Image (cartoon, grey):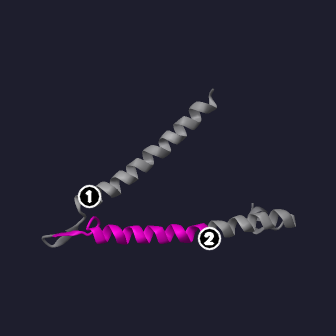
Amino acid sequence: MANKYLLFNFSDEQRGKLLKFRFLKILLLFPIILITVLAENFLEYLGITNPEIRGDGKVMTNFGRFLLFGSYYGGLAYFAYKEERKSATDHL
């Protein structure tokens, strides 16, 4: 397993493909982070994710809760659906 990740027993062509894939994966990460930060700032500007001050503490707005939990459970449901669909098509 160490040989696989430390690139010891790879040919030059295989090593080049693997390093190129790692580099492209890192390059793909930067625009995703930038888009996430910009979207978060935009939602805060609109007042969606600004916390409301109630008493001594702060709570998330109702729409912020809807976005957070809706996207979380929606994502879970989507991945469960994909897994179920994949297992159903494998049995055919």
Q: Which residues are magenta?
A: 27-53
- Res. 49 visible in picture: yes
Q: Is residue 57 above or below residue 89?
A: below
Disc 2 packing (10 Å; few <14; some 14–19; many ≥20): few
Q: Which mark is residue 63?
A: 1
Q: Position of residue 69 (x, y in %)?
A: 34, 54
The three-letter code of the residue at mark 2 reads: Leu
Quarter holding residue 64: bottom left
Identified at 66% across, 67% down, the residue is: 24
- The residue carrying mark 2 is 27
Image spot of residue 91 (x, y percent): 62, 28
Question: Horizontal placement of 26 versus 33: left or right?
Answer: right
Residue positioned 80% across, 66% down in the render:
15
Residue 57: where, in percent of width, then height?
Answer: 19, 71
* Residue count near mark 1 (Cα–Cα under 10 Å), binned few <14, some 14–19, many ≥20: few
Q: Is residue 50 left or right of residue 7?
A: left
The answer to whether 15 is drawn above or below residue 68 in the figure is below
- Disc marking residue 28: none
Picture quarter with the C terminus:
top right
Magenta stretch secondary structure, dominant? helix
Q: Residue at x 42, y 71 (%)?
A: 38
Q: Is residue 48 magenta?
A: yes
| 80 vs 6, nearest the viewer | 80
